[in-house]
Image: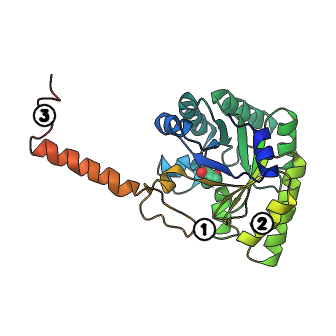
Amino acid sequence: MKTIQDFKKMKSSGQKISLVTSYDFWSASIIDESSIDGVLVGDSAAMVMHGFESTVNAEIAMMCYHVNAVKKGLKNKILIADFPFLAHKKGVAELMNGIDRIMKAGAQAVKIEGAAGSLEIINGLVNSGVPVMGHLGLTPQSVNQTGGYKLQGKEKISWEKIILDAVSLQEAGAFALVLEMVPSDLARTITEKLEIPTIGIGAGLYTDGQILVLQDLLGLTKNFEPKFLRKYLNGFDLVKQALENFNGDVKMKKYPSSKESY
Ligand code: KIV
């Protein structure tokens, strides 16, 4: 199993890190047998699994439910879980309770979006033995503020702010940093500046690793075609075709055959 220390070593030796999301037992069991380096139980579960319009609807209970299921299928990979919208902004007792529940559900680390207003919290968690991954650039929990899922860091001022935030997160003790939807050159500058690994999604080739939502890389999310996404399977059409084949066989009385009957 790759640990957070291994991720740091991978950065130093120039080995790229691959992460994918998982929300359930069956996909975790497949990922567990692959060479993927680690798994994120993303709060994207709110959208992908529950059909909400944004990740704002994810909650500690929802995250624990998915972490629990993933953990059962994942024996050989690190499991990182998203800390959901505002869950770290409701006072120390609620923060610690949320972290405790997510870690006891099976997470080995948590990911917290943004830097402003969270650095002390992140530092406190790291000092309490909780590995924290940062997340900058497009932070989907702030979609109502950013006004959409857009490229971040285009203007000089936001470019510089993302760099400053990245350095602050490293200083606060984050073990890695997700950079989402930022220009490739910005991701490269941050990657070269930091000692901790950067993991990109829509951040170009120069980050220390890449992460994709499993359903996106399998082509299961119809009509989701951002420029950064490479679909490694035409999952939506393949699954639909399998369902059509089953339906056809049932209607034509071709399934089950005598071999498939008792
Ligand atoms: O929630 C999520 O799936 C994520 C990744 C896309 C980085 O945060």
Q: Earlier in the sequence, mark 2 or mark 1?
A: 1
The vertical placement of 221 against 85, above or below, is below
Q: Nearer the viewer, mark 2 or mark 1?
A: 2
Q: Residue 206 placed where, x, y %?
A: 73, 64
Q: Which mark is residue 257?
A: 3
Q: Residues within 10 Å of mark 3 (few under 14, many from 20)?
A: few
**Foreground of the two, 133 or 33:** 33
Q: State yes or no: discs 3 and 1 in contact (Cβ < 8 Å).
A: no
Q: Residue at x 28, y 48 (%)?
A: 242
Between the residue at mark 2 and the residue at mark 1, the CA separation in whole angstroms equals 24 Å
The vertical placement of 29 against 18, above or below, is above
Q: Secondary structure at mark 3?
A: loop
Q: Residue at x 82, y 46 (%)?
A: 174
The vertical placement of 178 against 133, above or below, is below
Name of the residue lying farthest toward the top: 262
Q: Amino acid at mark 2?
A: Arg
Q: Which mark is residue 188?
A: 2
Q: Is residue 101 shown left or right of residue 238?
A: right
Q: Is mark 1 within 8 Å of ligand 1?
A: no
The residue under label 1 is 148
